[in-house]
Amino acid sequence: VYPPELAQAHIDGDYHIHDLGMGITGYCAGWSLRQLLEEGFNGVVGKTESVPPKHLDSACWQMINFIGTLQNEWAGAQAFSSFDTYLSAFIKADNLSYEEVEQAIQGFVFNMNIPSRWGSQTPFTNITLDWTVPEDLKDKHPVIGGKTMDFTYGDCQNEMDMINKAYMNVMVRGDAKGRIFTFPIPTYNITSDFNWDSENAKILFEMTAKYGIPYFQNFINSSLKPGDVRSMCCRLQMDMRQLRTRGGGLFGSAEMTGSIGVVTINLPRIGFLSHSKEEFFKRVEKVMEMAKESLEVKRKMVDDNLQRGLLPFTKRYLGDLHSHFNTIGIVGMNEALLNFLGPDSGVATKEGKAFAEEVLDFMRSQLSNFQEETGHLYNLEATPAEGVSYRLAKIDKKKYSNIKTAGIEEPYYTNSSQLPVNYTKDIFEALELQDSLQIKYTGGTVLHGFMGEKISDAETCKKLVQRIATHFRLPYFTITPTFSICPEHGYKAGEHKVCECGKGCEVFSRVVGYFRPVQHWNNGKQEEFKQRTPYDQKLSEESKFAVIGKPSATAGKISNY
């Protein structure tokens, strides 16, 4: 499918073309939950059809079947935005009790984690929860079963609260053995009117402190706006010099947008081979050009398959791929700097950080050129690189014995432009060093706050999240405690390979973006976990960096941290 030069560049490790095993499909997609609920799951000839759902339980089942079916037509994550807002209308219309709501949400979550269907894989899913009704939906009347309701979404805040409470309680309880659910990955919108002191907020931060389940999308102090998730549906007269944001973080996408494919550039190799700044940027430009060509090849192939009817449900609910991005990402910025600028450099140094920003700005400029040239959307992503960071480092070590990688027993590259995993115990120092880099990405990016064990209490966790959202500009972040699950005694804070009862435990942390037992990670990621220095709660509470960032004027009152 790919021309020899482009294929060889992947084989040799100049870059990595993701999801080659599912070449006829795109990467990730965000769907309009409003469209599904108003139109129903139907419209493909010869397939079972459903009318628009009239009740919450049938809405949940249509979402389950929709995601499971569309997962077969895409390689990666499937996303719904405004999950709580759109479902709240069904609760209000039927005057449901909390118990009825939780039962429906429990069924949705359990079915989203069953691998027995859809090719024996659990659908990779992301949902975004608004928490408060978005401004652009407040005055809109829901349509249920073809009938326009006599109330607006703005009247449904109490019902939204029920959805959020039910979802969090189901996620915290986990399955019958107390293991947490991997999917759907929830992203919570932190807006200027976020109610930090509600009953639900307490549950949210208890869940975050103990399990670290949520992603937080920063609408307080970043360039993001809540209504942006619905803005990609109509892209008429879009300025092709302007780089748009896909929205939704690493594993999500705004409504009716997503990514056709992802190519990750091997920056450490460029740093190792370059002898001057001019050569460095020429090499980046050349590899980006090849990445663009490979993405255009894939886009044509996926679009051809769409038009030929091989992706029937995508054709039914999306129509075309005009609002989907070609995604270029990076891995190993830190090691690129060590190889190019010298062993005393790295992304944490003043010189290294400045050069990293220059590289990302150059890449953004190139992507604008690609958009003008092709008429297609491009974005820059901090690629998750779960397997790529290990694959490319292994290739480079074999090819260039003197190249600098991370890792001692196993080589790996640090993700995107992140700090070395053992750089600091102070989360606010990491935030201060990463803030200006994180905002350069227009695709997925996130800063994970890896903690050695659960945060002591919900109030402390709340203040930490509040401080990050109001003092830093980065768009997405998590709080990620390490925890263990004993088959007999369940949850244990921190890393425990063996329980006091003598039984082996599963140790859980985020492998790039979602929780999996560390034992199941590849060798490179296990090496990274061994080297990782988790952030220290007490040190972070006393951090001199905690007050450096400027709070947003719209952030409201900030708790003392």
Image (cartoon, grey):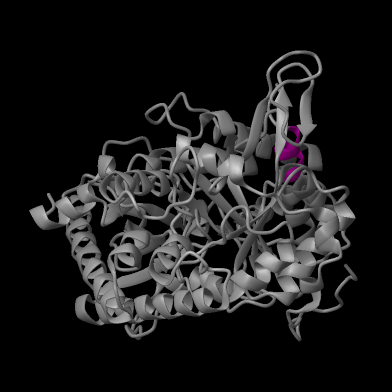
Q: Is residue 26 above or below residue 442?
A: above
Q: Where residue 444 sits: x, y (%)? A: 48, 62
Q: Does 384 sit left or right of 370 as displayed?
A: right
Q: Residue at x 74, y 44 (%)?
A: 452
Q: Nearer the viewer, residue 336 or 401?
A: 401
Residue 199 seen in this snapshot: no
Q: Residue at x 47, y 71 (%)?
A: 441
Q: Where residue 153 sits: x, y (%)? A: 68, 65
Residue 336 seen in this snapshot: yes
Q: Count up the numbered dots.
A: 0
Question: Which of the 4 image quarters holds residue 156?
Answer: bottom right
Does the magenta run of residues contain 14?
A: no
Q: Residue at x 38, y 69 (%)?
A: 340
The magenta stretch is 168-173
Residue found at the far top of this picture? 502
The C terminus: image quadrant: bottom right
Q: Residue at x 66, y 68 (%)?
A: 431
Q: Where residue 521 sits: x, y (%)? A: 50, 34
Q: Where residue 270 sits: x, y (%)? A: 31, 65
